[in-house]
């Protein structure tokens, strides 16, 4: 947001408790958790943070169903997943926190990034789209 916030760009944040049960808070506690616990240090997001959703399994939010269907993994490796808290498991499931999706200004899903993707690669793709 600091690099691209003045342009036609925004980040959208979604909390999810399906990854190691690391987000047990209720929605009204999320901003305080970010500010004082994780990452803490007074962090206040400069982007919208939405209510908690499920991104995998029977109760997954339709947005994430659409994103995963539109941007499937090229070479999925199910074995990389940590302890799972959803069912059924599908090959294109989001594997862990901080997986990212880049969407064009007109709402078209453009690219999917796993949690190990260097942020510089994401920044390069954002620059190309903007």
Image (cartoon, rainbow, N blue to C red):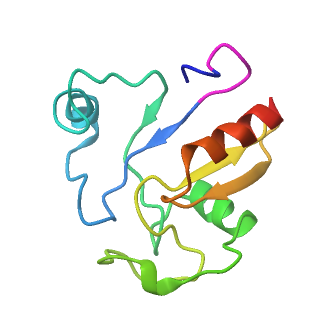
Q: In this view, does 50 lie above or below 116?
A: above
> What residue is rendered at 25% in x and 52% in y?
23
In this picture, residue 128 sits left or right of residue 21: right
> What residue is rendered at 77% in x and 51% in y?
110
* Main SS, magenta residues: loop
In this picture, residue 2 sits left or right of residue 4: left
Q: Where does the image place residue 126, in percent across and percent down from the top left?
A: 72, 36
> What residue is rendered at 65% in x and 57% in y?
112
> What residue is rendered at 36% in x and 54% in y?
16
> Is residue 120 covered in magenta?
no
Q: Quadrant of residue 2?
A: top right
Q: In which quarter of the image is residue 77?
A: bottom right
Q: Is residue 8 above or below residue 21?
A: above
Q: Can residue 105 be seen in this view?
A: no
Give the magenta range: 5-10
In this picture, residue 93 sits left or right of residue 109: left
Residue located farthest toward the top when viewing the structure as drawn: 6
Q: Is residue 86 visible?
A: yes
Residue located farthest toward the left when viewing the structure as drawn: 37
Quadrant the C terminus occupies: top right
Q: In this view, does 103 lie above or below 96?
A: above
Q: Where does the image place residue 55, in percent across and percent down from the top left?
A: 48, 62
> Is residue 7 covered in magenta?
yes
Q: In which quarter of the image is residue 76?
A: bottom right
Q: Where does the image place residue 124, in percent across and percent down from the top left?
A: 72, 39
């Amino acid at each position: 947001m600091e690099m691209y916030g003045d342009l036609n760009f925004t980040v959208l944040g979604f909390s999810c408790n399906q990854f190691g049960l690391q987000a047990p808070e209720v929605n009204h506690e999320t901003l305080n958790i970010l500010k004082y616990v994780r990452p803490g240090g007074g962090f206040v997001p400069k982007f919208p943070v939405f209510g908690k959703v499920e991104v995998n399994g029977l109760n997954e939010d339709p947005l994430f169903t659409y994103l995963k269907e539109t941007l499937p993994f090229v070479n999925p490796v199910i074995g990389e997943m940590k302890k799972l808290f959803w069912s059924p498991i599908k090959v294109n499931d989001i594997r862990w926190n901080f997986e990212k999706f880049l969407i064009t200004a007109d709402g078209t899903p453009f690219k999917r990034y796993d949690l190990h993707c260097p942020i510089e690669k994401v920044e390069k793709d954002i620059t190309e789209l903007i």
